[in-house]
Image: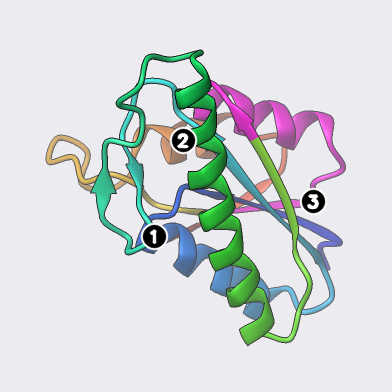
Amino acid sequence: MSSTVLVPVDGSPLSRRALRYAFESFPDAEIVAYHVTDLFGPSYGPDGDLESAFEPMVGTDAWDARVRETTERLFADLEAVAADHDRSITLESDVGDPSRLVLEYATEEPVDHVVIGSHGRPNARRPMFGSVADSVVRRAPTTVTVVR
């Protein structure tokens, strides 16, 4: 059985579903929710709706505050999901390219399994997998479960 399960989260409904799946499928594992703020993409707001979270210029104090606020709201929601399952959760975050950083985390940390939502943002050209899920499935050094 897996001892550490990495769940990349972006606030989307499918990433929340992946987190719930991880709690239910790996009852004895440490669950690590890893959020990467994409510098150039929209993010999910507290209601699960896409929003342009980064209206201020990247690198400004206003941008940093907005990223911090968005991440804190997401982490509060994820802690509530963990509490619903009577579990604890490890929360990690970073800023950069989600595909690269998720793969880097899965490679460099003691991760036994990755559980990822099939996609975060709707994209008609990629109906099965989003680009992050596709990269993780193809390149992760461990078993990956994709939740749809």
In the foreground, 60 or 127 = 60
Disc 1 marks which residue? 46
Disc 3 marks which residue? 112
Is-magenta flag for residue 111? yes
Q: Place residue 93 in its image quadrant.
A: top right
Mark 2 residue type: Arg
The nearer-to-camera label among 3 and 1 is 1
Label 2, label 3: how many angstroms apart (C-alpha)?
A: 32 Å
In this view, 55 is above or below 93: above
Mark 3 residue type: Asp
Disc 2 marks which residue? 66
The nearer-to-camera label among 2 and 3 is 2
Magenta extent: 94-115
Q: Badge 1 local density, few (<14 within 10 Å), some, or many (20+)?
A: some
For marks 2 and 3 on the same chain, the one whose residue lies earlier in the sequence:
2
Badge 1 marks a residue whose secondary structure is loop
Label 2, label 1: how many angstroms apart (C-alpha)?
A: 13 Å
